[in-house]
Structure formats: structure tokens, C-alpha cells
Image (tube, helix red, strand yellow):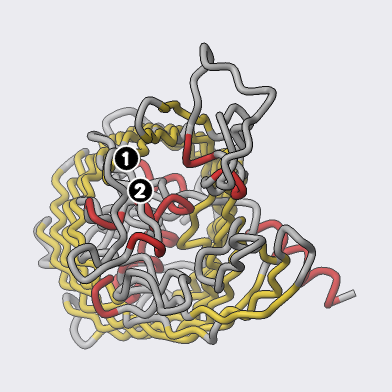
Amino acid sequence: MKTNLFNYVLLLFSTFAFSQAGHIMQGVGAINMSMGGAATAQPLDISGALQWNPASISSFDYQTIKLDVGLFSSSPELSSSFGPLSGTTMDDRGTSIMPNIAYVWAKEGSKHTFGASAFGISGFGVTFPEDSNYPQDILGNPNPNYNPNQSSNPINFPQNAGGFGHIESDYMLLQVSLSYAYEITDKFSIGVQPNINYAALQLMPNPTANPSMTAGYPATNKASAIGYGAQFGLFYDSGFGLKLGASYKTTQKFQEFEFDNTYLDNSMATSKFQMDYPAILSFGLGYSVSDVDLALDFRRVDYENTDGFSKTGWTQTGSVSGFGWQNISILSAGLQYKGISKLPLRIGYTYSSNPIPEEVTFFNVPATAVIKNAFQFGLSYEVNSNWKIDGVYHYGDSGDATKGQMLSPFAVSPSNPLGKIAGSSISYDMTTSMIMLGVSYTFKKATD
């Protein structure tokens, strides 16, 4: 029974794929999302505090449990051209579910605060169907069903026609954490949070595996890996409205993903791929006065020293050595207005730089969901002193499309180390939308 329940929880968390800043969730829970993800120095709810600064949970005086569930949808578009051929393929992945659970144990007057959480903190996923409107295969055999009056997307041509065929990816990372905060003084707290991570990754085709000369790149099973890491935080509340916070989440080190690969000719092989979660440094500023709470966060994400993201290019056997992402900066800002009784209102904005350099756009087709600008509006309804219901609406866009050239390991030369294909192009962009609802219960007497 316990095993079945554990598998069900993993299945629930594995249904989401929400890529916001790189492949990092911009926020956790309806309240934190509605503030643009800013919480390092403005802990408005336990989920945002546990995610971005474990020291800030010292600001809570009661036991609280919180559950958030969101419905997320996206509309990625993948475009490519080669010579006279060009086209765009729309993603048909559908809606994903995003659950988060948090708990904080606190006692008024105590210097010690404890927390526990299970958050989906990372994910990406696309489903681009195969384009069968190709003129000929790689051997020069004509396609009798080719229609020259219909658009063609070369990147989605079947592999025997020089494309990737049906492109599908599914990645999720579930982080389970235990948190502890200690109040050194009534204004200054420190916090620590050990993390255990579970990640699952599926790629179709799998560019990290060695291609076959006769059967191209294989499809994979969904491989999983366990990782470990920690987060440390500092939190200062001046007592007159100004709040400061800082946190550092270490690299979450994972085991290798072990893939069982199946090629188009039904032959099989195994391969391994290392993909960690990057270190994140966060600084926060908060200010509260009367009916207004302001929050501003700045984050720096270290992809350039993270296995799976730091390397790029082709290996000697024609597989892809990594995503090749660069470090990014994230700016989150939020405002809460509490002037309406029992109905606080919130707006938030998140900006993220693009981790994908132009020259490696091709390698990142399975992880196209990078959002540059995100806008949120949220509110809560305080049912009573115990129960609260939260909601948020999110909209995001990638700004300018990520663009580059198509690449091939067969075109690699000393003057062309990435194998750029002349006369080709590839690009992708997307928009995202989400509705999330949350409910929290605080274990305190109604008269408190």
C-alpha cells in the first residue's frame, strides 16, 4: 500500500512540464507565483519561503499546511528551413498538472522553526509531430505523397529524410526538503535545508545516445535519477518595514540517467547522461507599510558549471555532449495590497535572460520552453483565521524567438566545429498560461 501511494505521488508530480527561467520554476504555489516568485526577503506564505529562503520561515508563528494545484498550458512553435523548404510545427502536448505541498511547524516565542515540502521545481516538455511532407529521403528516393504547395518543416522530417521526426521530451524534478530556521536575534535568522531530489527524463529521439548509420537516433524509455543538495539562507526583518534576505542553493548532484534506447530498426542499446540542477544565488528586498507589501528578488543561475548544461557540441561518435547553456539572471517583483478586508490582491512580474546561445539553438529543440517575460495576477480569500484560499493567473512569453542554424555531426570540420548546415535555420518561441488554486490551514484557535 505504501509503495502504491508513493508511485501515485511520483506520477502526479511527473505530469507537469513548466519551463520558466531556463528550466527553473519561477515560483512555487499560488501566492508566490502571484508575486512573480519574489520571496527571498518577503515571506508572504510558507511555500515561497521554503522554496527561496529557509531562514525566512522564522517569520511564521503557527503550524501551517498548504496545498497548491495548477493547470498549465503552453503553445511552443518550432520552425525551420532548408533551401526552399520551410515550415512551422505546433506543439500538441496539452494541459499539465502542477502540485505543491508545504508544511511549517512554528511556535510563537520559539527561536526554532521547522518545515517540510515536496515541490516540482523544474521541468520541460514538448511534443512536435512528424512532418511527412518531404520531397525525398536521404538516399534520393522521391516521396510519392509530397505536396510542393504545402509547407514543410525540415526539422520534423522523418530521420530517413534528414530530420528528427516526431520530437518529444518529458523532464521533471521533484524536490523533497526538510528545513530549519533559527532566530539568532528577534530580527536576524539563519536557515538550512537539505534536499533529496527525484528526476525523470525521456527523449524522442535521444540525441545524447550514439546514432546508428542505418537507423538514426533512438527513442528512450523514461529514465530516473536521484540527487542530493542543500540550501542555506539569511533573513533580516528590521521591524519597521524593511526586510533583507539572501540564499544559496547548491548544485543538486544527480546519478546518471541510464537510458534503454530503441532504434528505428528495433535494435537496442543503453547509454548514460549526467544532468544536474544548477546552483542558484538569490538576493531579496522586501518592504511592508500599512496595506502594502513589496518584494524584489534577483537570482543568478550557474548553468556554466553544471553537468549536462556546461558542455555542448558533438562527441566523436555523433552524440550530443550537452545543452550548452550560459548563466542567466532572473528578476522577480511583486506587490500585495491588503486594503480590502479578507481579500488581499497581488500582481507580479518576472524577467529572465535566455540561457540558450544562438550557436547551440539546434541542440535544445527538446527544451524549447524559455520564457523571458511573465505576468501574474492573484488574490486570496481569508475564510477565517484557520482557512485561506488562494488563486493566480499567469501569462508568459519568450519575447524574441531563439534562433540559430541546423547542425549535423557529418558537417563537422576544423573550420566548422558544430557542423552548421549552410542555407538552414531553426527557431522556436512560445507563450504560456496557467491557473493555480491553493488552500492553506493554520493550526490556531479562531479567537487568536
Front residue of this view, candidates 342 and 436: 436
The residue closer to the viewer here, 9 or 251, is 251
Mark 1 neighbour density, 10 Å: few (under 14) some (14–19) many (20 or more)? some
> Mark 1 is on which residue type?
Ser
32 left or right, relative to 95: left
Q: With 286 as the anchor, is 167 left or right in this view?
A: right
Whole-number angstrom distance, CA of label 2 to CA of label 1: 6 Å
Quadrant of res 53:
bottom left
- In this view, the residue farthest toward the top is 149
Badge 1 marks a residue whose secondary structure is strand
Label 2 is placed on what type of residue?
Answer: Met
Toward which corner of the image does residue 286 lie, by quadrant? Answer: bottom left
Of the 4 image quadrants, the one containing the N terminus is bottom right
The disc at residue 406 is: 2
* Residue drawn at the location 40% of the way across and 77% of the way down: 315
Residue at the location (29% across, 82% down)? 232
Residue 112 seen anywhere in this rendered image of the structure: yes
Q: Position of residue 410 (x, y in %)?
A: 40, 62
Considering every residue shown, the one lying at the far front of the view is 140
Callouts 2 and 1 close, C-beta under 8 Å: yes
Percent across and percent down for residue 268 are 75, 73
> Which residue matches tag 1?
424
Q: Is residue 342 visible?
A: no
Image: 400 above or below 287: above
